[in-house]
Every structure is written in structure tokens, then in C-alpha cells.
Image (cartoon, rainbow, N blue to C red):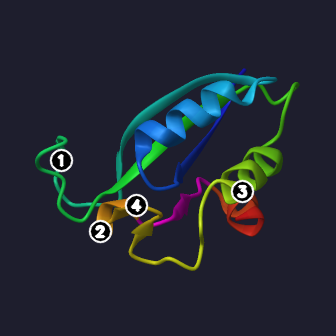
Amino acid sequence: NHKSLVVAVGCFWCGEESFERYGPGVVEAVSGYAGGTNQNPTYGNHPGHYEVVLVEYDPKKTSYSTLLRYAWRNLDPFDGDGQFCDQGTSYRPAVFYANEEEKMEA
């Protein structure tokens, strides 16, 4: 029974690769978009969306809070308009929580 974390850490391809290399407990990391109004965002058309990584994990091997701490080590939370060399609204840092417990962790 897997759980998931959705996090925006700048460029989604870099975030995806980072979580895939993380190791224990990460089942899959997939790039995508969240937070915008376009129902079918694409790389060329995603106004208002964040670039995010959906991290599927095994809660018997790692935890939401452990993965969240890992995400925070891979971004600059003080740069509100991008991350490092990737600037613009789609590269903003964010955590998309699914419930109150995750909200408290984030």
C-alpha cells in the first residue's frame, strides 16, 4: 500500500531525478503540473501551474516527513519566484498536501 508526496522543487526533471536516486522506500517519481487552472497542462502551455514531482513511496521503508525534509534540502524556500537558475512562476517551491496531517508536516 503506497503513499504519495507532491512537491514543487523547481525544475521537475531535476526533482524527479533527485527523488529517484533517493533510494529506500521511493517506488516512483513522476514529473507533472499542479496548482493551475488549465485542465490539460503541457510543457508549452501551463499558466499558473507549478512544476511538481509526484513521489510514490512505501511507508514501511520511509515516511512523508523524511521525504519532505529531503525536498527542503533540494530547494531554496526564500526564492519565491523560482529555484536557482530556473526562474519564473512555474518553478516556485510548494508542497501540495492531501490531508491535515500532511499539512502540519509541511
Badge number at residue 88: 2
Locate residue 2, reporting x and y percent: 69, 25
| Spatial CA span between label 4 and label 2 | 10 Å
The quarter holding residue 58 reads top right
For numbered disc 1, what is the local secondary structure? loop
Locate residue 54, reporting x and y percent: 51, 38
**Residue that carries the numbered disc 4 in the rendered image:** 85
| Spatial CA span between label 1 and label 4 | 28 Å
For numbered disc 4, what is the local secondary structure? loop
| Spatial CA span between label 3 and label 1 | 31 Å
Label 1 sits on what residue type? Gln
Label 2 sits on what residue type? Gly
Label 4 sits on what residue type? Cys
Residue 3 vs residue 84, the one in the foreground:
84
- Sort mark 2 into few (<14), some (14-19) or many (20+) by Cα contacts within 10 Å: few
- Label 2 near label 4: C-beta < 8 Å? no
Residue extent of the magenta highlight: 92-98
Q: Is residue 2 above or below residue 10?
A: above
**Residue that carries the numbered disc 3 in the rendered image:** 73
Hey, which residue is sitting farthest right in the picture? 60
Left or right: where 26 falls relative to 52:
right
Q: In terms of sequence position, does the residue under pointer 2 or pointer 1 come before the other? A: 1
| Spatial CA span between label 2 and label 3 | 20 Å
Q: In terms of sequence position, does the residue under pointer 2 or pointer 3 come before the other? A: 3
**Residue that carries the numbered disc 1 in the rendered image:** 39
**Residue drawn 74% across the image and 44% down it:** 67
- Label 1 near label 2: C-beta < 8 Å? no
Which of label 4 and label 2 is nearer to you? 4
Left or right: where 66 falls relative to 18:
right
Looking at the rendered image, the quarter that the N terminus falls into is top right
